[in-house]
Amino acid sequence: MGTPPRVMSEPRHLPSVDSLLRTDPAVALIEQYGRELTVDAIRQTIETTRTQLSNNFLTDQPGTHELITQAGELISHWLTPTLKTVINATGVILHTNLGRAPLSISALQSLLATAGAYSSLEFDLGTGGRGSRSIHAAGLLCQLTGAESGLVVNNNASALLLILAVFAKRRGVVISRTQLVEIGGGFRMPEVMVQAGAKLIEVGATNRVSLEDYETAIDGKPVALLHAHHSNFKMIGFTSEPPLKELSNLAHQHGLLMIDDQGSGALLDTSRFGLGHEPTIQESLASGCDLVCFSGDKLLGGPQAGIIMGKTELITKIGKHPLARAVRVDKLSLAALTATLDHYLRGEAEIKIPVWQMISAPLSKMKAKASAWQSTLGQGIVIDGQSTVGGGSLPGETLPTRLLALETRNPDGFLASLRKMDPPLIARIENDRVVLDPRTVMEGQECILLSHLRQVLG
């Protein structure tokens, strides 16, 4: 005999939305959240309950109080933000998934002041007429980099897209196969170029390219040579690429544009801090590049932005393109970026910009913090470790640090518990132990971190 068909019970009688709204708990919800949201939550709770009863997922019909409680929990769920502040104890300084560069106090103050009032975003205070938002950071950028002019858009991918759309639509752009990179989220350099309408001209092999390869490609009448920095990977072994200056000279000999997608936005020499040398914006421009684009929220240490620096006539043309409006930067990013650039001009980037504070922090400070955590908790051991820059910058480069290592039976479960805290605490697993790196824990977060750890260690 076969299995008898499952008998579905008839939907049971549930109170109406109106009757529930007249109860004291519902009135309290209305006072707290408003009538419209409360009605939506109660209606959805009733529908969900009716479905569960019809499918025998519930054996007992919930009472009025339970239904209102569920509606309140649903409202709370709806209103809980998904974008939360977290404590980063991973040791990855520019953690892309955690928002990359945290802003300096001055940048936060500037952002708050601009957000809370009207501003001269596109108003000329001298003439009383319409102004341009492009002036607010351009002057500082030119002073820092030596470029003739600059333009800020919403991120570096859009910066490159805009450059190619303006100068290379239906025209060839030469790029080495060693630089056909894919960045986070699956965005690939060839696909960006195609979206801009450029014709991709690949040269060289996957590990080696020569100046002669570029010279041969010029016979195809391209409009530009494009150099893309290896921001998120490192080539080792039998590899070679011509220097940027030689590429610039070649491009100019043939009347072509030299474009450098520098990416990381380094304005300081990273080798001073025990890291490999990351090419700087100043170096790219000094090599003769006509246009250089980079991110604002990587090694520059500011808000998300795409920055284009170069010759005035080229920047002016870019700014007039219709796509420039679609990818323009907002007033809050400009406010934070301007304040961040001010730190560089004052020579205080290492002590004011969080990214550079973390990079320049001495090993002795990391040891002292990790030891203090261990002493406070009375658990764990302090071990040697490595911090990474992250964010597609300086791949393979690390900074020595000290880690607090905690032995637990279930490291994955331990991390899951830390992620449920408020604010969530993000750490990592190394050799089956939960490890926490003090280098990326912001000032003012250590007490919260220790409180979270105490609760989970329990």
Image: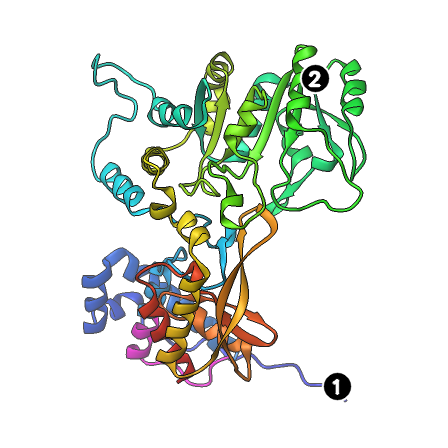
Q: In the image, is residue 107 above or below residue 22?
A: above
Q: Position of 273 compared to 14: left or right?
A: right
The residue pinned by badge 1 equals 2
In front: label 2 or label 1: 2
Nearer to the camera, 368 or 100:
368
Circle 2: element type: helix
When asked about the image quadrant of residue 118, the answer is top left
Q: Tell me which residue sits at (47%, 65%) in the image.
A: 437
When asked about the image quadrant of residue 42, the answer is bottom left
Q: Position of residue 53 (x, y in %)?
A: 47, 77
Q: Position of residue 8 (x, y in %)?
A: 55, 79
Nearer to the camera, 140 or 222:
140
The residue pinned by badge 2 equals 250
Q: Where is residue 101 in the image (x, y as percent from the top left)?
A: 43, 48
Q: What residue type is labelled 2?
A: Leu
Q: Which amino acid does label 1 sit on?
A: Gly
Number of marks drawn: 2
